[in-house]
Every structure is written in structure tokens, then in C-alpha cells.
Amino acid sequence: MNAEAATPPSPDAIAKARRAVRQQAETARLLGVDFVPCFRSIEVETPASLAPAAPTAPALPPDPRRRESEAKMAELRARYERDAPHEKFTTPHQFTNLVWGDGDLCARLMFIGEAPGADEDRTGVPFVGRAGQLLSKMLVAMGLQRESVYIANVLKTRPPNNATPTIEEAALCAPYLHEQIAIVRPEVIVTLGLPASRLVLDSSESMGNMRGRWAEYVGPGLQGPRIPVMPTYHPAFLLRSYTPENRKKVWSDLQMVMTRLGLQPAP
């Protein structure tokens, strides 16, 4: 073992690890979780306690399905830009960027929200504002990374006055969302909020009646089995009504998703 390999972790590295543990615990507390995922401790007593680095795994061969999905998604986005359904309810000066989608096109789990907000409109990326930051904390609590899921909205542009999408606006953009789902082909969908849940499930029920129980998505162009859907409250709703009861409801919904997918909180 060379001298570099035997060097104990620096105080900065230890501090970062401790901050990560605190962040995970705080995330769990905010979501109403009644347990905290355990982390391995960093051994710093002696250099001998440091295990040698594992060999680097060979790069995986390119995934043909991912290449195909990328091509289909690029084609779908180009068609949306040509069709511009949003022009029927907004004008170019009312939004800045098209907010299409983000994440893994072969993801097992897909999240669908209602529409971009100001931060999303500015960056062109869904769920990057305060609600997006809370969604990222939810993913951490589930043992996931944002890059491992796919995130999209019903509307691809910020609606006028940042209003809740109307039925007519959602209907104009729905065909493109249906095709996004068919391209990703997730094993489970989580709908965030009432507009997304009603559109995906073709339902008129209230959010309170839909959340907490499984439903199924059957969309046009979908090939293969029906997709289980778990409707839950939008992170923006939690920010407005940040009560222990609401946090526990959302965490209960996400735990059902984790069970369905066989997920465990990150070690």
C-alpha cells in the first residue's frame, strides 16, 4: 500500500460525510418519516482500517433501447415545437423556454406534474424551483437520484399568470404527454397534484379520493401492460400546507411506490 492510499480521510471529507447524514435525517423528518436510513461510518482510527479501492467496473455497452428512446423523444419534441399547441392559450412573450422533460428515458419511475413555474420557465428544466427542491428531497428519502427517474409536466410552457392549467389547456397538450409516457415506458407513474392526476387517469375525482390507492394508466399508443399510477399531492401544495399530516400522507404514498418497485432507502 502506498503512502497516498494509507492517508486517512481529511477533516473536510469527514465534515462533508457528516453533513450528508444530517441532510438525510432532516429530509426524513420533513417528510414525516419515522425512521432514518443508516449510513456506514467512516473509520479514521488507523490507516489499516481503510479498505483498498474496488477495481473500476468496465463500462456497460450502449443500451439500444435508450438510443431508440432518445431518437423518438427528440422527434416528438420537434413535432411539438412545430405544432405549438400552447399558442392557443399563450403568446411567446408570456413564457421564456419550452420545459420538456428531464431524466432517464428508460426510467422505471416517472413523475408527472402540471405545468412549469417561473424557475422552470427560466431554465427550461422541470421541477427546479422550491417545489422541485422538495421533490429532490423526496427522491433522496426513497433512495433514488433525480437522474434515475423521468420528470415531465402536462403543459410544456408556463401558463399565463402562472395559473393552474385549465381542462382545455391540458387537453391540447395531452397527446404529447401520452407519447412521452409511451417512449419512457415506466413501470410506475407518480402523478403530482390534481390536474396531472385527472388527466393521466381520465378521472374527475378529488385529490383526496385519488391519493393513497393504486390506479392504472392506459393511454393511446401505449404498448404492453397497463402502468400502475400513484396519485399524490404536488410538492407545491406541501409547501403551502406543510403539516405533519400532509407530509405523512405523501410519504405513505411514496412508500407504496417503493414497495411496488422493490426500492430501499440508500445505505
Image (tube, rainbow, N blue to C red):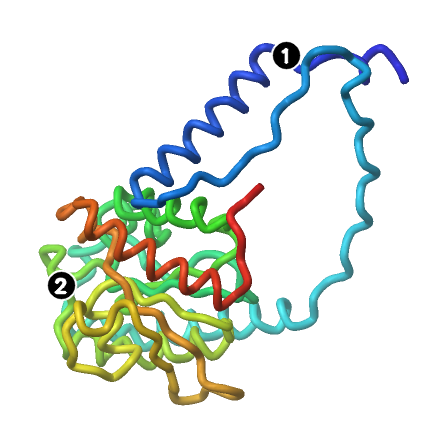
Camera-side mark, 1 or 2: 1
- Say whether marks 1 and 2 touch (CB < 8 Å): no
> What label sits on residue 80 in the rendered view?
none
Residue type, numbered disc 1 = Ser
Q: Looking at this view, is 100 or 257 the one in front?
A: 257
**Rendered location of residue 105, percent (x, y):** 53, 65
Q: Quadrant of the N terminus?
A: top right
Using the rendered image of the protein, determine whether residue 156 is visible from the camera's viewpoint: no
**Rendered location of residue 143, percent (x, y):** 50, 48
- Mark pair 1, 2: CA separation: 49 Å
Residue 255 vs 29, above or below: the answer is below
> Which residue is identified by label 2?
164
Residue plotted at (25% across, 68% down): 211
Residue plotted at (16% across, 78% down): 205
Point out the tag, 1 or 2, that comes first from the N-terminus. Answer: 1
Decide if residue 134 is on the left or right side of residue 57: left
Using the rendered image of the protein, determine whether residue 108 is visible from the camera's viewpoint: yes
